[in-house]
Image (spheres, grey):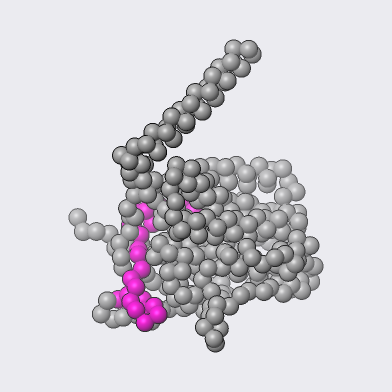
Amino acid sequence: RSFCSNLMNNMRSLSVFALFTGAIAFQSSPQIRNGWSTIISPPRAFRTVVSAVPETEVGTKVVMSESTAVPETDKETNSAVVGGSTDAANMMDDRIYNFNKVVIDTVYDIICFLYPVRGTKRDFARFFVLETVARVPYFAYLSVMHLRETFGERSDLMSERMRTHYAEADNELHHLLIMESLGGNSSVIDRTIAQTMAFGYYWYVVAVYSISEQAAYHLSELIEDHAFNTYNKYLTDHEDMLKNSPVPAIASKYYVEDNPFLFDLFCTVKDKDEQGDYSTRRPTLESLYDVFINVRDDEREHWKTLCNLVQYNDMQGVENKMVQATKAAPPLPP
């Protein structure tokens, strides 16, 4: 036991020394800083072509059609017309796109297999698992950006994204708290499954985000799209049950009583009113149905922000009604 304790202490000391000397070398050597930037911020694996209309599950009634509207296009450039100019959206390399889709669809199919929706209280366990996994990427983004800050990288763009991702993580946290208040985490088995999936996915996203931010954002875009469709179908299939259920206290606190600063911060793609000012969402809650309406709409807000980040590398890339799902670019000729 004494040997193991001494070994661990020595390893900790060596780790601290390595980090300390590495930080000094980083700050003193432009070559090392440039090399690090090349590793953590490589060129995006994207091509500039127009994307298409986002996919939705067949047979699903989607209320928020305005956020998925087909944009007007310029026939000559085949690019979306945005604010009087033509901005071409980036499409992903088809290999990265298809790999991301396989990863997320596999995780989602596992959750669907383990937690089929049947209109019972067990449905909240499914949503608990989904929200536990869905909030992980925002932590991963922040972890990588904090590390970059630690090594001296500074920019207004990165600071803005960090604030937005924190607000998104806070929003997903409250979704999770709502599901917990409904009993979604009552089983130790459900908690173990959710936390194991989240732990592994966290490190995966950290690795992907360190190599390609857009590829990591696309992973979350796919997750948020699944989440939106899941909640939308649940609202359609179980409307009566939800309308006869009370509002959880944590939902009222978050959506109605709390300061809306963080809530407004994660809504980066907003509609404009008649005066040209951006609108604000102020939810009203009368039943559990309204709670799930707002949770679903939150997922669409995340999806819109992520689509803009993937396609334009800008959270406000295009306006609300112009946002479209990311598509794979045609394979390059051999």
Residue found at x 49% / y 23%: 14
Residue 93 part of the magenta segment: yes
Q: Is residue 333 visible?
A: yes
Where residue 2 appears, as percent x and y from the top left, is 63, 12
Q: Please tell me in which quadrant of the rendered image residue 81 appears.
A: bottom left
Residue 160 versus residue 319: which sits nearer the camera? 160
Where residue 314 appears, as percent x and y from the top left, is 43, 64
Where residue 311 appears, as percent x and y from the top left, is 39, 64
Residue found at x 49% / y 53%: 104
Magenta extent: 78-105
Q: Viewed as shown, does residue 334 lie left or right of 47?
A: left
Can you name the residue that lies furthest to the front here?
Answer: 28
Residue 271 versus residue 122: which sits nearer the camera? 271
Please determine whether, in this image, residue 248 is positioned above or below residue 188.
below
Where residue 197 appears, as percent x and y from the top left, is 57, 45
* Circle count: 0
